[in-house]
Image (tube, helix red, strand yellow):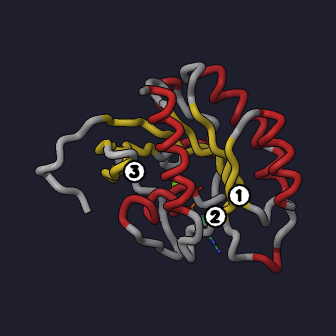
Amino acid sequence: RENIHDKIDYVFKVVVIGDSAVGKSQMLSRFAKNEFCLDSKSTIGVEFQTRTVTINGKVIKAQIWDTAGQERYRAVTSAYYRGALGAMVVYDITKRQSFDHVARWVDELRAQADSSVVIMLIGNKGDLVEQRVVHAEDAVEFAEDQGLFFSETSALSGENVDTAFFKLLEQIHRVVS
Ligand code: GDP
Ligand code: MG
């Protein structure tokens, strides 16, 4: 996908946050490598993955950071947020608690990242419709209230993953240009 002959106009750092096991790492590998692995383990040492895309005629290298399990110990450091222009705050539509914690993640993000950071709320595991406990309307209401973009995705099927990342990158481009 990446073409070494492309001239890169922008590098956008995007962080992915949210409770453990909501599918952050799978979202990232779906977007960066178009892969999904059913029993994934967080890869120690891998800090970010990249994918280069063209948006509005500009070549944008998205550098997407993964917590690599740090969220388990609430050890996501300020270095993780530093320089982030965008963020995906992910919850699992089948886990109420992961949605209840979204406000905390957004607060932490706002405290640590740049004030112009573009935030997208993501309800992942959209394929598990039978187990849904978080209604999309509640997420839409929260997102509107907080000024966030919102999408439901499935890292497993790939549904909406690219669309959500492209939307976020497009908004960041709007902010920086
Ligand atoms: P993280 O801790 O937030 O990085 O979560 P992972 O990406 O490691 O995923 C946690 C678990 O949820 C793994 O067993 C994944 O296979 C599973 N998972 C992630 N995304 C999806 C999804 O969209 N649908 C379903 N059904 N399972 C998913
Ligand atoms: Mg992970």
Q: Residue at x 59, y 45 (%)?
A: 88
Q: Residue at x 87, y 56 (%)?
A: 137
Q: Position of residue 123 (x, y in %)?
A: 71, 58
Q: Which mark is residue 123?
A: 1
- From what the image shows, is residue 61 above or below residue 175? below
Q: Is residue 71 left or right of residue 141?
A: left
Q: Position of residue 74 (x, y in %)?
A: 64, 36
Give the labeled residue for mark 2.
153
Q: Secondary structure at mark 2?
A: loop
Give the labeled residue for mark 3.
44
Query: What is the distance, in whole Å, between disc 1 and disc 3 at their CAs?
Result: 25 Å
Q: Secondary structure at mark 1?
A: strand
Question: Is disc 1's CB within 8 Å of ligand 1?
Answer: no
Question: Is disc 2's CB within 8 Å of ligand 1?
Answer: yes
Q: Is residue 31 left or right of residue 115?
A: left
Mark 1: amino acid: Gly
Q: Position of residue 1 (x, y in %)?
A: 26, 63
